[in-house]
Amino acid sequence: MEKPAITSQPIHTLIQQRWSPRALSGEPIERATLQKLLEAARWAPSRNNLQPWRFIVAAKTDEAEFKRMFECLLPGNQKWAHNASALITVVASLVGNPSKPPTQAFLYDTGLAVGQLVIEAMANDIYAHQMAGIDREKIMATYSIPENHEVICTIALGTMGDAATLVPPFDEREVAARERKPLDEIAFSGAWGAAF
Amino acid sequence: MEKPAITSQPIHTLIQQRWSPRALSGEPIERATLQKLLEAARWAPSRNNLQPWRFIVAAKTDEAEFKRMFECLLPGNQKWAHNASALITVVASLVGNPSKPPTQAFLYDTGLAVGQLVIEAMANDIYAHQMAGIDREKIMATYSIPENHEVICTIALGTMGDAATLVPPFDEREVAARERKPLDEIAFSGAWGAAF
């Protein structure tokens, strides 16, 4: 199912076609493809080149590992993410994080990296759905993540599946229109609130 | 000048070719092109669809506006960013930011949006250099940015220029090799530190 972004100017097809489906096919993703996604993240821009992004990968081809990460999702996400072909948990490292503002560069830069990962996924016909509904303490314990790291989200990855396979309320959400604030509420010029 | 990412698997050319040059041509960027970049950011994924990203745009075609934003850069960045064709200041809004971890979703999501903006720029032969070296208090005052917002960075945008036009030490930095941590230091499986 396609849900292209509605834009005032044409944008690159990988960005226009990107969205976050829950209906995934469960078809295996090759290891080499997962490596592409990680390489795309690896080469993101980074303040002082600190590269705070870290990833824990669980491909469905490794059933035990997939199950271990799947069980760290909150119940709502478990109702659909079992059809993902891979789960990737995103972690941000505070090691060397700048003391000068913005002091949360480790979070912003990790967002930059996942931005690239998601576009590289689209280039391989793989959709990504980032989940905030995860048990972060369980993830920290399960993978022995050091204390100076923050678990951001777990990404469900897969090729497009059939919306009709989803249980409520996810089936209806899947076909609902995507919405964004109008451009003049997020892009200004000259002064705050003055539309570009 | 090209500085392609060196990867273990081929990645999409827009991501592979992306880097953050300082030598920019100064050639004008059309308003429609800047709108494309902002649209790409606008349609990024966002936790609870809060869309915390905000942008203040100063195109060089508007000399007074460009100068106003340029004067908010720290002196080091002023030595080269005068050749940018546009400056975009990135701001993250805390309005509605989740109280559940990670509580800094507004920063991570703003990173996701700029990740898309930068790739859309590449699709238009425009390079982006994100600068943390900016006077955030001056920017908050200049643009009357509300208190519950955080200034992240200012992006210098332009088509590729000539590295020889840069003053030291930027001329040498421009031609230096790009470096990233090896993949096995950022991508794990099974346990923290266990290479994927």
Image: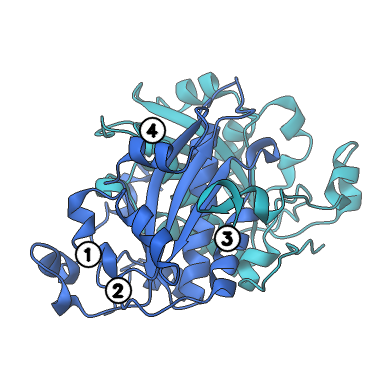
Chain colours: A blue, B cyan
State which chain disc 3 sits on: A
B107 w.r.t. B40: above or below: above
User: Residue A38 got which mark?
Assistant: 3
Report the amino acid beneath label 2.
Leu
Image quadrant in which you'd find residue B136: top right
- CB-based contact (under 8 Å), mark 3 and mark 4: no
B52 w.r.t. A172: above or below: above
State which chain disc 4 sits on: B
Report the amino acid beneath label 1.
Trp
Who is closer to the viewer here, A131 or B80?
A131
Q: Tell me which label, 2 or 1, sits earlier in the chain.
A: 2
x and y percentages locating residue A2 in the rendered image = 29, 78
Mark 4–mark 2 distance (CA, rounded to whole Å): 28 Å
Residue at 8%, 65% in the rendered image: A168
Q: Which residue is mark 2?
A: A24
Mark 4–mark 1 distance (CA, rounded to whole Å): 26 Å
User: Residue B104 got which mark?
Assistant: 4
Badge 4 density bin: few <14, some 14–19, many ≥20, Cα 10 Å: some
Badge 3 density bin: few <14, some 14–19, many ≥20, Cα 10 Å: many
Mark 3–mark 4 distance (CA, rounded to whole Å): 23 Å
State which chain disc 1 sits on: A
Q: Tell me which label, 2 or 3, sits earlier in the chain.
A: 2
Badge 2 density bin: few <14, some 14–19, many ≥20, Cα 10 Å: many
Q: Which residue is mark 1?
A: A80
